[in-house]
Image (cartoon, rainbow, N blue to C red):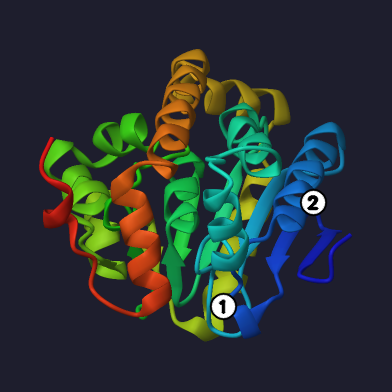
């Protein structure tokens, strides 16, 4: 297990905690692999009722580790390996997913929440998906799930315009269930898990499957997005965006022409 992730189980709740606050809990390939393994173990464990994702150090997650991401991008690799394994698993997780979000939730740290059943956030939580600013496209099934969850206009605002959402805006859009004080965030999530644990397990599983809808359609969209993402990683727009990021300057997409 990577030291950047802490996985524990107590009272029927498997907690997956990001423990890399010095890097704003940005996600490495090793962390993705361990998250996938933990979700699979928890789903197979009859003693686990739900999965809780939570950050540390006042941050949920800044998304993909930028060093690893740029290394993969230079190699023309899009969403692949452990990252895609994790994304592919999300719609197939059988037990409820709960998130406790404090501080930043960027990129995949926001789009993954579209697969979650309960999301609690602090008032200072911030959600953003700057994919297009990097010449890339949304992932994790978000191009399908976000419009279904929040409507086209708000999904476009979040995923395409790249407008950051405050916790209140995310609650209004249906991404967040409730806003809690930081001191009560984890306790609120655990209380919700305890309520789920008290329900008839078979009825809970059946109700969740019905509410989640067509898993095959979500899985198909994830594959479509992954192929498109990979094609974008090696595009001139993405190369200009990555170069601008490394050189600490605004990107100049105009010099590339339109189309």
Query: Considering only vertical position in the picture, is 77 above or below 135?
Result: above
Say above or below: 99 vs 114.
Answer: below
- Quadrant in the rendering for residue 225: top left
The disc at residue 138 is: none
Q: Position of residue 46 (x, y in %)?
A: 86, 35
Alpha carbon of mark 1 to alpha carbon of mark 2: how far?
18 Å
**Image position, residue 23 (x, y; %):** 61, 79
Q: Observer-nearest residue: 199 or 11? A: 11
Residue 175 in view: no
Task: Categorize mark 1 by other alpha carbons within 10 Å: few (<14), some (14-19), many (20+).
Answer: many
Helix, strand or loop under label 2: helix
Q: Residue at x 84, y 61 (%)?
A: 8
Mark 2 Cα-neighbour bin, 10 Å: few <14, some 14–19, many ≥20: many
| Element on which disc 1 rests | loop
Residue closer to the observer: 149 or 179 = 149
Apparent side of residue 46 relative to residue 144 in the rendered image (left or right): right
Quarter that holds the C terminus: top left
Going by the image, does 219 lie left or right of 157? right
Q: Indicate the position of residue 173 as horizontal and vertical percent values.
A: 23, 51
Q: Nearer the viewer, residue 114 or 172?
A: 114
**Picture quadrant of residue 141:** top left
According to the picture, the residue beneath numbered tag 2 turns out to be 34
Circles 1 and 2, Cβ within 8 Å, touching? The answer is: no
Residue at image mark 1? 24
Residue found 38% across the figure and 65% down from its top: 243
Task: Judge whether 246 appears above or below 9 on screen.
Answer: below
């Amino acid at each position: 297990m990577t030291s950047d992730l802490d996985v524990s189980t107590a009272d029927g709740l498997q907690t997956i905690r990001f423990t890399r606050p010095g890097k704003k809990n940005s996600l490495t390939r090793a962390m993705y692999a361990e998250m996938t393994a933990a979700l699979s173990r928890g789903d197979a464990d009859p003693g686990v009722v739900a999965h809780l994702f939570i950050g540390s150090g006042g941050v949920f997650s800044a998304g993909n580790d930028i060093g690893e991401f740029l290394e993969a991008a230079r190699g023309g690799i899009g969403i692949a390996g452990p990252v895609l394994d994790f994304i592919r698993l999300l719609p197939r997780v059988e037990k409820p997913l709960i998130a406790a979000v404090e501080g930043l939730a960027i990129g995949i740290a926001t789009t993954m929440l579209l697969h979650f059943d309960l999301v609690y956030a602090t008032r200072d939580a911030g959600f953003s998906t700057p994919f297009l600013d990097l010449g890339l496209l949304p992932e994790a099934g978000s191009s399908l799930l976000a419009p279904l969850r929040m409507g086209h206009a708000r999904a476009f605002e979040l995923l395409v315009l790249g407008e950051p959402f405050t916790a209140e805006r995310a609650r209004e859009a249906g991404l967040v269930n409730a806003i809690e004080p930081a001191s009560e965030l984890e306790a609120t999530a655990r209380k919700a898990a305890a309520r789920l644990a008290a329900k008839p397990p078979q009825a809970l599983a059946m109700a969740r499957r019905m509410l989640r809808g067509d898993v095959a359609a979500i899985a198909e969209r994830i594959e479509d997005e992954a192929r498109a993402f990979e094609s974008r990683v090696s595009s001139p727009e993405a190369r200009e965006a990555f170069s601008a990021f490394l050189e600490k300057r605004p990107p100049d997409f105009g010099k590339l022409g339109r189309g």
